[in-house]
Image (tube, rainbow, N blue to C red):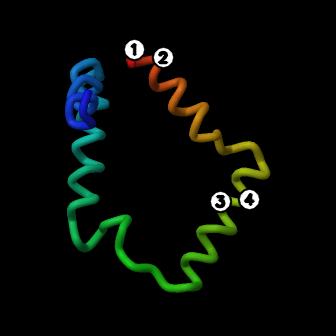
């Protein structure tokens, strides 16, 4: 199954409200002015890393393998 086919199969089983969130996030990512992929300066990057480190230390983060496993279970992938 291709990435596109997988994405479409996930969108088909999501409730409409969650599909709307996916579309809004996708739209924001494609907007040049608010893209999460826009270049950042050194200070912003260090601040983001520090914040992530603090969140992880407080147990507010989950490992990628755990998240992916949960998604596969939830959506039957």
Q: CA distance from mark 1 to mark 3?
A: 30 Å
Question: In the image, is residue 20 above or below residue 40?
Answer: above
Q: Circle 4 is placed at which residue position? A: 54
Residue placed furthest toward the front: 1
Q: Circle 1 is placed at which residue position? A: 76
| Residue at image coords 29%, 39% | 21
Q: Upstream in the sequence, badge 3 or badge 2? A: 3
Q: Circle 2 is placed at which residue position? A: 73
Q: Are marks 4 and 3 in contact (CB under 8 Å)?
A: yes
Q: CA distance from mark 4 to mark 3?
A: 5 Å
Q: CA distance from mark 4 to mark 1?
A: 33 Å
Q: Upstream in the sequence, badge 1 or badge 3? A: 3
Q: Quadrant of residue 46?
A: bottom right
Q: Residues within 10 Å of mark 1 (few under 14, many from 20)?
A: few
**SS label for mark 4:** helix
Instruction: Give the x, y percent position of residue 61.
Output: 65, 44
**SS label for mark 2:** helix
Q: Residues within 10 Å of mark 2 (few under 14, many from 20)?
A: few
Question: In the image, is residue 40 above or below residue 6?
Answer: below
Q: Circle 3 is placed at which residue position? A: 52
**SS label for mark 3:** helix
Instruction: Give the x, y percent position of residue 34.
Output: 30, 68
């Amino acid at each position: 199954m291709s990435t596109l086919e997988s994405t479409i199969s996930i969108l088909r089983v999501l409730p409409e409200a969650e599909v709307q969130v996916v579309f809004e996030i996708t739209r924001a990512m494609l907007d040049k002015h608010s893209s999460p992929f826009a270049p950042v300066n050194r200070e912003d990057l260090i601040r983001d890393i520090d914040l992530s480190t603090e969140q992880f230390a407080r147990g507010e983060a989950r490992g990628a393998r755990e998240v992916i496993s949960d998604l596969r279970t939830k959506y039957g992938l």
